[in-house]
Amino acid sequence: MRIGDRRPAIDWPTAIEQGAPPTLAVWKFASCDGCQLTILDCEDQLLAIADRVRIAYFPEATSGSVDGPYDISLVEGSITTPGDRERIAEIRQASRLLVTIGACATAGGIQALRNGADIEEFTSIVYAQPSYIDVLADSTPISDHVTVDLELRGCPIDPGQLVGVLAALLNRHLVRPPTTSVCVECKATGAACVLVASATPCLGPITQGGCGALCPGFDRGCYGCFGPKEHPNVTGLRRQFAAIGVDDDATDRLLSTFNVAAFADAEQAGGSEP
Amino acid sequence: MHHPTGADGDTRRWHLDHIAWDRLVRQLMTDVDEVIGPVMRSGVVRLRRLTDVGDLAIGVVDAQDAGSYRATGSSMPTRFDHGPGPDSLKAIVHPAETPVWTIRRRDGELRVEPAPPDTTTRAVIGVRDCDLRALQVLERTQTSGPHPDASFAARRDGFVIVAVDCTRPAATCFCTSTGGGPAASTGFDIALTELADDADVHYVARAGSARGAELLDLVANRADPAVVARADIAVASAADVMVRTLPDHARTIVDVPDHARWAEVAERCLACGNCTAVCPTCFCTDLVDEVSLDGETSTRRRTWDTCFSEQYSALGGEPYRRSTASRYRQWLTHKLGTWWDQFDESGCVGCGRCITWCPVGIDLTDEVAALLQPEAVAP
Ligand code: SF4
Ligand code: SF4
Ligand code: SF4
Ligand code: SF4
């Protein structure tokens, strides 16, 4: 968050002042666990994290749990059941800072591809006893239900960004995730532009940076897993896709893969002009 | 006809066959820490560090247009028969990321350790006239004011530049209408003209500095007048093939801040920042601080920024350039207009990179032409 961003001020864990380790909880909703695995993937930094916080609830790493309150809650996954809805409200109540991690928590995730489809039809095909299934019609982001202090984008999140944000939160440091495009990171890392050099559809120009241009670095177009950047000009990029032979249906599929309606909503809201 | 010369009217010319060429590159490799030149990466000609003479891209031609770049093979073993790639000297002297300092907490006190200057010596092979001029433009922005950028000066120091005259400019190039090109004009140690006779690729060279002359004397013989004449013709005819132009009064776009074209280009512009990143003279930076998990050290880096980012204009609480139209206008009017007020020259050297590498193919020469048209009055 930069100066100038009118988001709520960060409510710093008081534990920091008192010299006690802040408590960190990790919560899981509908998700593939990939973001939690990213935390475990931080390897050499993991011990440094464990040194600074008391890990209170982390279903992927330990079976024990501690009652709240929690200083920092990392929330993975989207809200898909009535039970989820109640649980996220309780977690919000018990948490000083709530940080969502990954595309599921911030936008609804791949599972939100079902939004707008007939749930009863799905469940009757997939499950032997569809009556056991108690599920909401849509898969929705955490911010649809409770106030979120900070969002970490990506499917999955970027380990470097996670460690950077935790370090900042634990030390009362300014938190500034990028607001600019993946293109900025392509140029900084020296990745060749796949859109210009090989007419590969790439969502990078409208996607928020933070991954270090991972996919273009491997000569792949960006799939947009970090979601829309500030005021993305979706229509402008759609026009360019059409010029390189990608039709509207294919563009729509690309736009909706990881962040559901986030790009479509931005397109409807009018793109480049705020 | 204009005859390119070396420094101070030095009219000596050298001739390099492939043996002399290899000798030149090897000599540079022993003289400096890093030799950088055009190499192929992911289908694009990039400026990268060479580990061997053979790393240089050979037999590559390119086709560039607004929003499009294709490099293909040619039957001739030429080394410089392509236009500028996405990298300019900026990436070397003013890189995307520069360390600034590390702060450490020791015994309750904070100790600031400035990042040591980069003292690596470098040679760059294949620098075009637009980039020679861009280096001077950048030198002015970074070092002419009251607070010269020491990290720029350290990297610029001891640079050896082997320039190349352009004999086949890209379709996006328009250097001749910004006062330069296609022959290397200034600020080089050695300038080459590439000549290809079937499979035989050879070079006519001139010296731009004492160091350049010494190097050439060491590796090559003097050229005979007939081959020099051929080289001069090849360079002179390159000027005629440039299709894009920038009018002399381009800077007057500052006088039409309310022109409807600004809003129109904003419909197409993605505000992605590719143009500022590839532009050899765009110099704006941001400062990024990172604290360690234990809170004992904090590092500051300087990174490229872009005026196409909304947050770039965040001042006193709010970004003041909210619309893409205002950001595109800021970029173009600074580059072509207010740059004159600050540095007494234009910020554009006509390399065409912003045209090729714009993912939606926005062409500043088109935008300027439209902005200089009086607006149609509604009936
Ligand atoms: S590859 Fe994609 S993200 Fe990278 S510069 Fe090109 S359009 Fe932008
Ligand atoms: S390049 Fe795009 S799809 Fe790939 S990791 Fe980054 S944001 Fe996700
Ligand atoms: S504005 Fe465009 S053409 Fe001019 S110097 Fe910059 S990149 Fe090159
Ligand atoms: S002009 Fe092109 S490259 Fe520059 S910000 Fe706009 S879309 Fe990106």
Image (tube, helix red, strand yellow):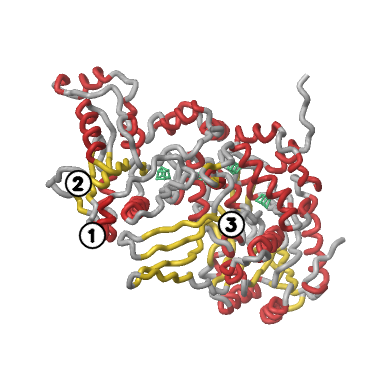
Q: Amino acid at mark 1?
A: Asp
Image quadrant where residue B123 sits: bottom right
Q: Amino acid at mark 2?
A: Phe
Q: Residue B121 appears at what percent x and percent y?
A: 57, 74
Q: Residue A103 appears at what percent x and percent y?
A: 35, 38
- Residue matched to label 3: B87
Query: Mark 2, mark 3: which one is toward the viewer?
Result: 2
Q: Residue A238 appears at what percent x and percent y?
A: 53, 32
The dot on residue A51 is 1
Quick one: B130 or A43, which is closer to the camera? A43
Residue at the far left in the pictured view: A64
Dot 3: element: loop
Q: Amino acid at mark 3?
A: Asp
Give above or below for A203 relative to B87.
above
Indicate the chain on which mark 3 is placed: B
In this image, B226 relative to B16: left or right? right
Quick one: B34 or B43, which is closer to the camera? B34
Q: CA distance from mark 2 to mark 3?
A: 45 Å
For ligand 3, tell me if the residue under mark 3 lies within 8 Å.
no
- Residue matched to label 2: A58
Mark 3 closeness class: few <14, some 14–19, many ≥20 residues within 10 Å: many
